[in-house]
Image: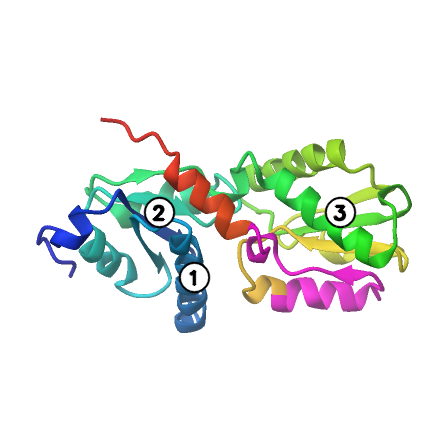
Amino acid sequence: MYSTRSPSRKAQATKGRAIIVSHGQPSDPAPADRALAAFAARVGARLPHWQVTSATLAAPGALDRAFAQTGEDALIYPMFMTNGWFTRDALHQAIGPRHAHVLPPFGAEQGLPDLAAEWLRDVLRRQGWTASDTRLFVAAHGSGRSKQSAQDTRAFAKMLARQLPFADIRIGFVEEEPFLSDMAFDLGRQSVCLPFFAAEGGHVLEDVHEALELAQFEGVRLPPIGCAEAAPALVARTIEGAEVPA
């Protein structure tokens, strides 16, 4: 159970309080919980007058413990890639009657295509490549139950294409067509795989990896976009600039 005590004087003296929430890994919650805590610490380092903590939905009691630290009126930052079921339903069910304000998810960040474009420009510079001669493969989750995940991924890829004129941008999904392995074939050596995921969990380490191996992908494999060096700064800016309803 979470504590109903008021936040400490130290917490009350802060500018604000935020909880970064992700899905986590139900079969083995601890590693994902630790990784998210490390990410939250990097966000908090950019918000010195904020109390920033984290919780994965898969770790039993983690969200309750986070609320016990922050109080019930904390900002909730969903470290999810889409406005799908987990963000709309599962997260709100976990929050329950608490007066928390839920921000849009990481994948819907307006600055995310800019972040990805700058990251990819750096990759291209280091490889000595130009975008017009390079193929980009966006590996994403997708969903067999909702079109929202695929729509959000395609919207991201469309905005990214406006900034970088890749020779080709392909999108493949774990849970719906077109599947990862079907789209990763014949991309050539001058190609980049960008996993459209918030963290390096099972889907990235297993599904994406297996699909790339099956397709004999020869290009550059990037970490998930949520692991980009600039990601904590992007999240920090959103938290700091959030407009909370009265």
Residue 171 rendering spot, x and y as whole percentages: 73, 46
Instruction: Tell me, yes or no, whether the highlighted magenta stretch contains residue 193.
Output: no
| Mark 1 or 2, nearer chain start | 1
* Circle 3 or circle 1, nearest the eye: 3
Q: Amino acid at mark 2?
A: Leu
* Separation of marks 2 and 3 at Cα, in angstroms: 35 Å
**Which residue appears at 30% of the width and 48% of the height?**
50
| Residue 122 in the image: above or below residue 24 | above
* Separation of marks 3 and 1 at Cα, in angstroms: 27 Å
For the record, the magenta segment spans 205-230
Residue labelled with disc 1: 36
Marks 2,3: beta carbons within 8 A: no
Name the residue nearer the viewer: 133 or 97. Answer: 133
| Mark 2 or 3, nearer chain start | 2
**Which residue appears at 25% of the width and 41% of the height?**
100
In the picture provided, is 7 more to the left or to the right than 61?
Answer: left
